Image (cartoon, helix red, strand yellow):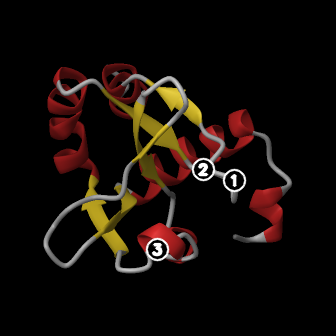
């Protein structure tokens, strides 16, 4: 992970993520060749779908448990459509994790509102 990003707190990484996704109209995830997306759970059993602002940063997380994963680009329109399904499945967005997978937990429908302006 880039040193600049490592120095950011979760709120700063979230603000950067929003800015980049709105600007580039894309978001990055990690995906297996079989189409499964990288996820993780916290100690309370909450499921997170981690997302990143760019290919390079997402790729830096394709290690250890995620070594078989590759960065996957998702266009903003497709991403926004997916938010309702994630909410129904009780999956939380893990906005731009740091190296220890510390994230700002974002409700998918709230994330959709922020990104779409609606």
Label 3 vs label 2, nearer the camera: 2
| Kind of element beneath mark 2 | loop
Marks 2/1: CA distance?
7 Å
**Label 1: how many Cα within 10 Å (few below 14, some 14–19, many 20+):** few
Along the polypeptide, which appears first: circle 1 or circle 3?
3
Marks 1/3: CA distance?
19 Å
Q: Position of residue 20 (x, y in %)?
A: 52, 54
Location of mark 2 (residue): 97
At 52% from the left and 42% from the top, the residue drawn is: 95
Along the polypeptide, which appears first: circle 3 or circle 2?
3
- Front in this rendered view, residue 103 or 75: 103
**Label 3: how many Cα within 10 Å (few below 14, some 14–19, many 20+):** some
Label 1 vs label 3, nearer the camera: 1
- Front in this rendered view, residue 112 or 65: 65
| Kind of element beneath mark 1 | loop
- Front in this rendered view, residue 47 or 84: 47
Q: Are the residues at dot 2 and dot 1 in contact (C-beta closer than 8 Å)?
A: yes
Residue 56, quarter of picture: bottom right
Q: Position of residue 97 (x, y in %)?
A: 60, 50
| Kind of element beneath mark 3 | helix
Location of mark 3 (residue): 55
Q: Image height check: is 76 above or below 26?
A: above
At 57% from the left and 70% from the top, the residue drawn is: 57
At 46% from the left and 68% from the top, the residue drawn is: 65
Q: Position of residue 83 (x, y in %)?
A: 23, 32
Location of mark 1 (residue): 100
């Amino acid at each position: 992970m880039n040193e600049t990003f490592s120095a950011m707190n979760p709120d700063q990484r979230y603000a950067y993520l929003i800015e980049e996704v709105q600007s580039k109209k894309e978001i990055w995830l990690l995906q297996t060749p079989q189409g499964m997306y990288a996820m993780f759970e916290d100690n309370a059993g909450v499921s997170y779908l981690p997302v990143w602002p760019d290919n390079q940063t997402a790729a830096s997380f394709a290690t250890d448990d995620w070594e078989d994963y590759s960065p996957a680009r998702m266009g903003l329109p497709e991403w926004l459509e997916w938010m309702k399904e994630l909410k129904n499945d009780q999956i939380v967005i893990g906005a731009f994790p740091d190296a220890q997978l510390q994230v700002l937990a974002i409700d998918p429908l709230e994330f959709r509102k922020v990104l779409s302006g609606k």
